Amino acid sequence: MKKAVIIGAGMTPVGEHWKLALRDLAVEAVFNAMDDAGIDKVYSLYVGNMISGPFVEQENLGSLIADWAGLGNIPAVKIEAACASGGAAVQEGVKAVLSGLEDVVAVVGVEKMTDAWPNDATRYLAYAADAEWELFHGASFVALNALVMRYYMKTHGYTEEDLALFAVNAHTNGAKNPYAMFKRSIKLETVLKSPYIADPLKLFDASPVCDGAAAVIITTPEKAKELGVPKEKWVEVAGMGRAIDTINLANREDLLTLKAAKIAAERAYKMAGVEPKDIDFFEIHDAFTIMAALSLEALGVAKKGDGAKLAREGQIAIDADYPIQTMGGLKARGHPVGATGVYQTVEAVLQLRGEAPNQVPNAEVGLTQNIGGTGSNITVTVLRRV
C-alpha cells in the first residue's frame, strides 16, 4: 500500500488580522509550508474553509488562492465540512496522494471571521447546525452546546468547575505557543467568574472568533526522497477516519455520544494499526469545553462519562498520560473554523519532529480530531514520526 508523508508545515499567527485579507493569510501559510519543505512547486491545492461567503463575500477559494500564490494552472478546490473543513481537506489531500493521481499536494485551511459584526458571526457559525430544525427556532451554536453540557453535568454528576479545567489546561499550553491568540495562562476562577453566554457555558468555556491560516505539504516517501527533503522532516499520515451523525441534536441516538467521532477513530486506529493507548498526544476539538470531554470518551481514551474525570485528575497535561491541546487547542490558540483542522495537523507535525514550543516527551504517535457542527461531521487522523 502506498504511504503519504507530510514534508512541510506552516501557519500564520491566530488573531484579529485587520490589515490582511483572507487570500493574504492563506498565501502566507502556503509559502511557509513550501519553505519548510524546501520546495518551490506543488501540483494540486486543497483549501479547507467553512464559510468565506458570508464572512468575506468570497467563494471559489481554490482559484483565488492558487492564483494569488502564483502556483500556476494547477487543480485547486475548496473543501467544506463545517468546522471540520480543515481536517477534511487534509484527508482529501492524503487520498489524492495515496491514489497515485497527485504526488505533491498543498493543503491550506483558512478563515477570516473578525470582519463581521458579532451578531452576524454568531448567525454564520450556526449555519453548521440544522437550518430548519435548529437555526429557524433561534438555537445558536452556543445554545446547542450549552444544552449538551447541561445534560452531561446532570447525567454524570459533574460541575461547571470540572469542565472549566479543560480551558485552564488549554491556556497553560497556549501560553508557550507563539502563534496562539491567547498566549497567557489563566486560573480556574477566571473561567468560573467569566459571564454566561448560554447557561451553563461561560465566556471562557468557548473558543474565540478569529482569523488565521495553516498549511501542509503532502507527498509520498519516494517523491520526498526525489525532492531531497530530509527524512527528519517527514511525518507519516498513518491512519484516517471520517464519519457523520445526525446534523440536528433532536434526532441523535444519544445526546452524550459523539458517534461520528467513535466511528472515525475506529477507522483511523485500524488503518494505522494502533490503539488509544499507543497515542502520545491528542489534538482534539475543544470549541467548547464540553466537546473536549465528549471527544476523549468517543476516542476511547476514557469510558463513557469519564471524560471530565481525566481533567479533574490532571491526566490531560503535557507530562501526564493523555496530553491534549499541546499548543493551546481551539480555546487558547484560537478557532478560525475552516483552518482549525490544518492547525491541528501542523501542531502534530511539530510535536512529532520534536520542534514544538511545548514538547510532549518522546512523542512518536499523535492524533487530530476535527468536529463539524455539534458532532455531525468528524475527522480523525493518526500521524506517526518517521
Image (cartoon, grey):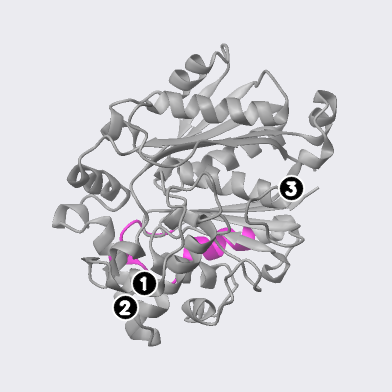
| Residue 56 in the image: above or below residue 262 | above
Q: State if disc 2 and disc 1 touch (CB < 8 Å).
A: yes
Residue at the image point whose x is 31% and y is 78% from the top: 151
Query: Residue extending furthest left?
Result: 137
Query: Which residue is identified by label 1?
Result: 255
* Picture quadrant of residue 155: bottom left
Q: Is mark 2 on a helix, strand or loop?
A: helix
Q: Is mark 1 on a helix, strand or loop?
A: loop
Q: How far apart are marks 1 and 2 (CA)?
A: 8 Å
Q: Distance between the residues labelled 3 and 2?
A: 40 Å
The foreground one among 51 and 385 is 385
Query: Which residue is identified by label 3?
Result: 353
The foreground one among 288 and 168 is 168
Residue at the image point whose x is 28% and y is 27% from the top: 57
Mark sitting earlier along the chain (3/2): 2
Give the amino acid at mark 2.
Tyr
Mark sitting earlier along the chain (1/2): 2
Q: Which of marks 3 and 1 is in front?
A: 3
* Picture quadrant of residue 320: bottom right
User: Where residue 98 sits in the image (x, y, percent)?
Assistant: 71, 37
User: Where residue 27 sits in the image (x, y, percent)?
Assistant: 51, 24
Crowding at mark 3 (Cα within 10 Å: few <14, some 14-19, many 20+): many
Q: Nearer the viewer, mark 3 or mark 2?
A: 3
Magenta residues, start to end: 245-267
User: Where residue 137 sits in the image (x, y, percent)?
Assistant: 14, 57
Mark sitting earlier along the chain (3/1): 1
